[in-house]
């Protein structure tokens, strides 16, 4: 499950139009969030994605945009919970959702009303999904609700994005899945210090009703979620309406709720520090250095920093001279070699849709003077993704 202790912070976020801004082809806010998470949270906190997408469409999104790897992935509107990098399914949750669920009966009712079914990949064991135009939604929901009541079916309807209509078991949904997860973490002695839920559309509303969470409705939220918010009676002080869109709204909410740190290394890219004394190092400062180092490298290639010896020397000073680079293919080099090869490449990526980011940063203390930082280094140039798994053995003497 990634980090295995009690998380300092758990962020539970929807993906489309919450974490991922489909209108921003540079993925600026997503990259800002990712850098912050890898530098300051990955070692002691838990990132959870909660999406309406099926595993197939989730995988598709991951191959298109610079998303970092979460500890837990909740898919198909809270009906599928998967853990860690291997995405091992939560069989207990599936078992719970099986109770009294009659999928065939739901499909039958949908057919009777001549509803338009979504694509096959989005029809899941505990989710039947249709497309219903906004102007017909109210009527369809009313009719379906009556039918389900007549036949005493265990089913609930969730309408999202002004088009998607999902039918799930009554005990499913993003909110119930999160409540289940929080109960499980608590039973394992791993209750998070704080939890922040983030969403933009109808299927996210339930997230905000889970006890003991902070919530953010991002600035670009859909009408149906804002309507839910304005009609929701009871305490709403834990829900923040962000001004900013998508992941920038999440960062804004972290500031609002004083969840620290909340300034992305991408917003302070020019303040990269020097390697420092071993005695001042922690797993977190090493993770921060890895993120800063790659950011500066990205900036050098994009010509976002001056082509000067001072800037160039900053690349070197963020790593100890005797550090080792362990490449995915087993070769060990000195990182200074890589740095020297990019000296002449200043600005080659200027104006190009190029970005670099790190994922799965894991830092281990090897001795009083040595840390091992492992991470995935990604690059994206237009549609082209390339990945290098790297590790840096950082030494201080
Ligand atoms: C995602 C899913 C879709 C679902 C929608 C709303 O787009 O792919 O099946 O209806 O989320 O929950
Ligand atoms: Mg969404």
Image (cartoon, grey):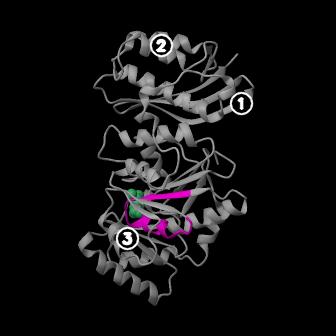
Name the residue at the bottom extreme.
150
Q: Residue at x 40, y 87 (%)?
A: 146
Q: Which residue is mark 1?
A: 365
Q: Are marks 1 and 2 in contact (CB under 8 Å)?
A: no
Disc 1 residue crowd, few under 14, some 14–19, many 20+, Cα 10 Å: some
Q: Is residue 250 above or below residue 395?
A: below
Measured from the top left, where is residue 303 in percent x and y? 33, 20
Q: Regarding mark 2 in the picture, which secondary structure is present there?
A: helix
Residue at 36 percent of width and 53 percent of height: 17
Distance of mark 1 from mark 2, alpha carbons? 26 Å
Of the numbered discs 3 and 2, the one sitting upstream in the chain is 3
Q: Secondary structure at mark 3?
A: helix
Which residue is pictured at 49% across the width and 74% down the height? 104
The residue lying toward the viewer, choosing from 230 and 3, is 230
Q: Residues within 10 Å of mark 2 (few under 14, many from 20)?
A: few
Q: Residue 125, relative to residue 350: is it above or below?
A: below
Q: Is residue 207 magenta?
A: yes
Q: Position of residue 23 (x, y in %)?
A: 29, 46
Dots 3 and 2: beta carbons under 8 Å?
A: no
The vertical placement of 326 against 213, above or below, is above
Instruction: Find residue 313 and name its label.
Output: 2
Among numbered discs 1 and 3, the one appearing first in the sequence: 3
Does residue 350 show up?
Answer: yes
The answer to whether 56 appears left or right of 81 in the picture is left
Q: Return the x and y of residue 280 as percentages of the image width and height.
A: 65, 28
Respond yes or no on whether mark 2 lies under 8 Å from ligand 2. no
Q: Residues within 10 Å of mark 3 (few under 14, many from 20)?
A: some
Residue hosting label 3: 229
């Amino acid at each position: 499950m990634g980090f295995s202790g009690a998380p300092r912070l758990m962020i539970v976020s929807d993906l489309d139009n919450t974490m991922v801004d489909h209108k921003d082809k540079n993925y600026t806010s997503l990259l800002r969030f990712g850098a912050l998470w890898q530098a300051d949270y990955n070692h002691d906190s838990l990132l959870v994605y909660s999406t309406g997408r099926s595993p197939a469409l989730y995988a598709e999104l991951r191959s298109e945009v610079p998303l970092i790897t979460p500890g837990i992935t909740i898919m198909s509107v809270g009906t599928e919970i998967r853990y860690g990098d291997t995405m091992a399914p939560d069989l207990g949750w599936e078992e719970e959702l099986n109770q009294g669920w009659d999928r065939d009966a739901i499909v039958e009712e949908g057919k009777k009303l001549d509803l338009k079914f979504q694509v096959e990949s989005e029809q899941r064991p505990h989710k039947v999904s249709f497309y219903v135009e906004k102007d017909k939604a109210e009527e369809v929901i009313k009719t379906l609700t009556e039918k389900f009541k007549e036949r005493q079916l265990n089913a609930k309807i969730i309408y999202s994005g002004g088009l998607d209509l999902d039918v799930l078991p009554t005990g499913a949904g993003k909110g119930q899945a999160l409540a289940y997860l929080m109960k499980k973490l608590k039973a394992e002695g791993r209750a998070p210090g704080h939890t922040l839920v983030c969403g933009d559309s109808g299927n996210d509303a339930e997230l905000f009703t889970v006890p003991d969470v902070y919530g953010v409705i991002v600035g670009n939220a859909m009408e149906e979620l804002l309507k839910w918010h304005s009609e929701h009676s009871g305490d709403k002080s834990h829900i923040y309406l962000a001004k900013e869109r998508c992941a920038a709204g999440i960062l804004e909410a972290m500031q609002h709720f004083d969840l620290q740190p909340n300034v992305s290394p991408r917003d302070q890219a020019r303040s990269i520090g020097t390697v420092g004394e071993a005695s001042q190092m922690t797993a977190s400062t090493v993770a921060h250095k890895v993120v800063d180092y790659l950011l500066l490298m990205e900036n050098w290639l994009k010509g976002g920093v001056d082509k000067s010896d001072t800037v160039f020397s900053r690349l070197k000073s963020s790593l100890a001279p005797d550090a080792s680079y362990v490449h995915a293919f087993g070769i060990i080099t000195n990182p200074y070699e890589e740095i020297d090869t990019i000296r002449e490449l200043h600005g080659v990526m200027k104006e190009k849709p190029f970005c670099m980011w790190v994922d799965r940063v894991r830092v281990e203390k090897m001795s009083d003077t040595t840390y091992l930082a492992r991470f995935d280094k990604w690059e994206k140039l237009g549609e082209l993704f390339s990945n290098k798994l790297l590790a840096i053995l950082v030494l201080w003497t």
